[in-house]
Image (spheres, rainbow, N blue to C red):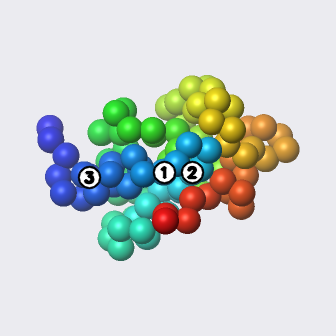
Amino acid sequence: MEPDEYSEAVLETVERIPPGKVLAYGDIAELLGRGGPRQVGRVMSLFGGGVPWWRVIRADGSPPRSGEARAHEHWRAEGTPLRPDGRRVDMARARWDGT
């Protein structure tokens, strides 16, 4: 299966997220002006393996369920700000503004 136009737009947005920054699924949909968190999640589950998928997380700062341990490795390597418990990203400090 090949990515459609929407999927390509999602993947291009993910590729632009700088190291140490993140976006929630809904943030990506908002930046694109279409779709929603579930649509972005579907794109990521089908086609996200070739982009920095660990930078796309749930709105509460939690990593994707399928790659939690690997996401934490990437976050530590990139210096992504984490909450005091070290389990979730500190969204206030790590959320990318899209510019």
Q: Secondary structure at mark 1?
A: loop
Marks 3, 1: nearer the viewer: 1
At label 3, the amino acid type is: Ser
Q: Residue at x 72, y 57 (%)?
A: 93
At label 1, the amino acid type is: Ile
Q: Which residue is mark 1?
A: 17
Marks 1, 2: nearer the viewer: 1
Q: Residue at x 68, y 32 (%)?
A: 76
Residue 28 sits in quarter: bottom left
The tag on residue 7 is: 3
Cα distance between the residues tagged 2 and 3: 18 Å
Q: Residue at x 55, y 65 (%)?
A: 97
Marks 2, 3: nearer the viewer: 2
User: Is residue 20 shown above or below 68?
Assistant: below
Cα distance between the residues tagged 3 and 1: 16 Å
Cα distance between the residues tagged 1 and 2: 7 Å
At label 2, the amino acid type is: Val
Q: Which residue is mark 2?
A: 22
Q: Secondary structure at mark 2?
A: loop
- Give coordinates of residue 53: x percent, y percent: 45, 39
Q: For this view, does 17 lie left or right of residue 92?
A: left
Q: How busy is the neighbourhood of tag 1: few (under 14 within 10 Å), some, or many (20 plus)? A: many
- Give coordinates of residue 6: x percent, y percent: 24, 58
Residue 45 sits in quarter: top left
In the image, 65 versus 98, the foreground residue is: 98
